[in-house]
Image: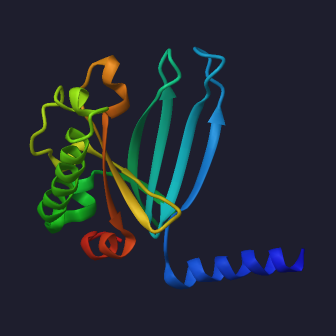
Amino acid sequence: MRHLALFFLLNFIRLNLYGQGASCELIEINNLENEIDPIFEKTCIYKNLKVKSFGKPDNKGRYSWESSLFLVTNSEEKEIELSDLFGSNSEKVEVYLNEKLQEEYEGHLGDPDLSECMKTIDFHKFALHEFRLDLQEGETVNFWLEYVTTSACFNVNLGLATMSYQEFDRLAVVL
């Protein structure tokens, strides 16, 4: 038991020393419209940034997420957009995210199990405001993009671009 406690203490110290990841809490909320699948509320805090996300199921139990970003200063929260977070670096971030999405998209086009659905996506350059920021407790920040697909292609309706916290810190202007 002492070894387990020491393991957790060392990992806690490691995370704090290297500043990796956000502190996150995920809670279930009773879903009055669907008694089987709950609504999820995820709140993550990284430095002075707070991201609140809600995951809501459809009638088949598949989840869609919406997020809001807040800048926390002196215990006050001010809702911001991704362009506020990255300021003068917004264009760099947008180019980076689109390059990562393009790589993922082309990889999926080459997969015989996914290619037909991928062809239904109108892939183009996406604006920064179209991405959803998802802070993680690990080493990366996720940026999700919801494509417009048919319900038969729901399994490919999300694109994902990741960024290290080190890169995120370098590009964010309000942290």
Quarter occupied by the N terminus: bottom right
Q: Position of residue 99 (x, y in %)?
A: 16, 56
- Looking at the image, the residue that sits furthest to the right is 1
The image's colour scheme reads: rainbow
127 sits to left or right of 53 = left
Q: Position of residue 120 (x, y in %)?
A: 18, 25
Number of callouts: 0
Is residue 162 or residue 153 the one in the foreground? 153
Quarter of the image where one finds residue 83? bottom left
- Looking at the image, the residue that sits furthest to the bottom is 17
In the displayed structure, 93 sits above or below 9; it is above
16 sits to left or right of 77 = right
Q: Residue at x 51, y 65 (%)?
A: 138
Is residue 50 or residue 18 the one in the foreground? 18
- Looking at the image, the residue that sits furthest to the front is 112
In the displayed structure, 126 sits above or below 171; it is above
Q: Position of residue 145 (x, y in %)?
A: 28, 42
Q: Position of residue 77 (x, y in %)?
A: 44, 55
Quarter of the image where one finds residue 148? top left
Q: Residue at x 16, y 67 (%)?
A: 89
In the displayed structure, 65 sits above or below 172; it is above
Q: Residue at x 19, y 62 (%)?
A: 93
73 sits to left or right of 147 = right
Is residue 47 or residue 16 the one in the foreground? 16
14 sits to left or right of 88 = right
In the displayed structure, 75 sits above or below 30; it is below
Quarter occupied by the C terminus: bottom left
Q: Residue at x 10, y 45 (%)?
A: 125
